[in-house]
Image (spheres, rainbow, N blue to C red):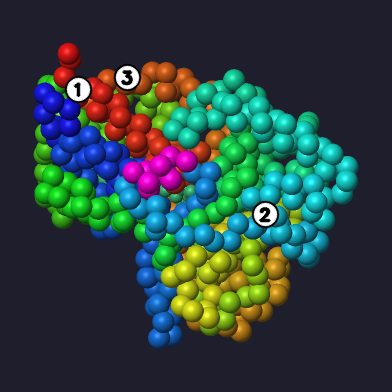
Amino acid sequence: MAAGAAAKNVIVIGCGIAGTAAAFRLRQAGHDVKLLERENYPGGRMSSYEKSGENVRYRIDRGASWLSHNYRPMIKLLEDAGLDSRMLPCSSELGVLRDGRVHRLSFVRTSDLLRTGLFGWKSKLKAVNLLRDLGSARRSLRWHDMSGAAGIDVESARDYALRRLDRPLLDYLVEPLCSTQFLAPADEVAAVGAFSIMWGTFGAASFTFDGGVGRLPTLLLGLPLMRSERTRVELSARVTDVRPDGDGVQVTWERDGTRHIEHAHACVVAVPGPVAAGIVPSLTDDQRTYLTGLRYTSDVHVTFGLRKPPRETALGVAVPRREHPDLCVALFEHNLGPGRAPAGRGLVSLVFRHHWSAERGALDDARVIEDALTAVGEALPDLAVHIAEHRDMAAVQRWDRAVLARPAGGYRDLARFTAGLDPRSPIQLAGDYFSYSTTNASLATGEQAAQRIVTALRPAS
Ligand SMILES: Cc1cc2nc3c(=O)[nH]c(=O)nc-3n(C[C@H](O)[C@H](O)[C@H](O)COP(=O)(O)OP(=O)(O)OC[C@H]3O[C@@H](n4cnc5c(N)ncnc54)[C@H](O)[C@@H]3O)c2cc1C
């Protein structure tokens, strides 16, 4: 902390990666931090848990499971925290299913697009347009705030692909990328979203942590800086109200029916947009309308522990909509790094397009598992047979708000929303809704919110 500046109390609401990163940067700047988290575990959509199979335990990522060396803010934070030695390499290949055959593309070698048997030569010539357009689009993409892309947000990913590429590139590249990232097909999301995925994915290797990506928030919370008495973490603490109070903020939260009221100099609200709209009454009507109207897709996915891993080297096999309407990717989680499946075992997740999940949100686990097995039997019959023969455990994960799927025009709406936010307010917002739903974007928004608070709390010279 700079001479003359006094430590201030800052509350961070939400202990996902946005809130955890904000807390870390605030502690680094010398402030005292209290984190309030609704669940009884930290990490939010970047968390992992253990589940037993027959005499063994698997570690399952609840939400995010894949990280990229393109995630520059995350890597910088890991370096600053002295945690970069915990990063481990993992598979950087994604398979794409076409006519019963899996074509593997490397994220690292973008030139695979020109070599793969997935497309004919006419499509490969058109792929040059894609690489050129991506080169221009990336100039307006920022991890912490995608509102700079408003100027190029003119069409859906599908319309872009039909205008500048061709049908095979739409069906076997753009659509599966959109479905895998947004759980929504290319006609439902903006072309900017498709560029964002390629920007975040192409040209760099993947990395992971031992035992799942949920290690990152817990590693951060375990740092000496974060375990000092100047950092408090309250789990099972549901915040109900955040409002300006004099020069600072007042935060109301509940646990087991008991209400707590806290005062602090500032606050980072790092919860999904619609939740922020419900707990921050000082937002304007337009801001609240924007946040409640954000379109998050839902996710119900099934993870199988397997006594033997399937013979697949890729981290996943994307299933284009032309190949199957519901299943969008089979993730081979044991290829995503150590500590997930015990040695010699496999861990496979089946992830579906959002309409399939929405129809199954209220069904019991047994029915969801049965439907997932039917879908994989139709799309990837060899994998279905393998699961049937070697199944050890099955787990169902459900998210009402999994990832943000912005339609065309959504980035222009975002730009109007961010233009109205006050960078000096003691209440700062963070979360993936400023960007596209990735752990890295959320982390970057948390850091930015922390930085705005550090600046606002600095004494005037
Ligand atoms: C199924 C799935 C797969 C994904 N795959 C990937 C991937 O492979 N790679 C990738 O980079 N990203 C992936 N993502 C996206 C990524 O996980 C998210 O964008 C990111 O983790 C969101 O972080 P966040 O901190 O903004 O929000 P969250 O993780 O949602 O954190 C918000 C926190 O606030 C808490 N909270 C909510 N309301 C309150 C309240 N009233 N009071 C107190 N606390 C509250 C929540 O419990 C939560 O812990 C995936 C997401 C899902 C769901």
Mark 1: few/some/many CA within 10 Å (<14, 14-19, 20+): some
Q: Amino acid at mark 2?
A: Ser
Q: Eyeballing the image, is 134 above or below 376?
A: above
Could you tell whether 448 is left or right of 343 in the image?
left
**Disc 2 target residue:** 106
Could you tell whether 439 is left or right of 150 in the image?
left
Quadrant location of residue 407? top right
Q: Which residues are magenta?
A: 72-80
Q: Nearer the viewer, mark 1 or mark 3?
A: 1
Q: Residue at x 78, y 36 (%)?
A: 128
Quadrant location of residue 4? top left
**Disc 1 target residue:** 458
User: Is 76 a magenta residue?
Assistant: yes
Q: Residue at x 53, y 81 (%)?
A: 344
Q: Nearer the viewer, mark 2 or mark 3?
A: 2
Which of the image's four quarters has the C terminus?
Answer: top left
Which of the image's four quarters has the N terminus?
Answer: top left
Please state the horizontal and vertical placement of residue 348, each as a whole percent of the image. 55, 69
Q: Earlier in the sequence, mark 1 or mark 3?
A: 3
Q: Eyeballing the image, is 216 above or below 451?
A: below
Q: CA distance from mark 1 to mark 2?
A: 46 Å
**Disc 3 target residue:** 422
Q: CA distance from mark 1 to mark 3?
A: 16 Å
Q: Residue at x 63, y 29 (%)?
A: 137
Q: Earlier in the sequence, mark 2 or mark 3?
A: 2
Q: Amino acid at mark 1?
A: Arg
Q: Earlier in the sequence, mark 1 or mark 2?
A: 2
Q: CA distance from mark 2 to mark 3?
A: 42 Å
Whether residue 454 can be seen here: yes
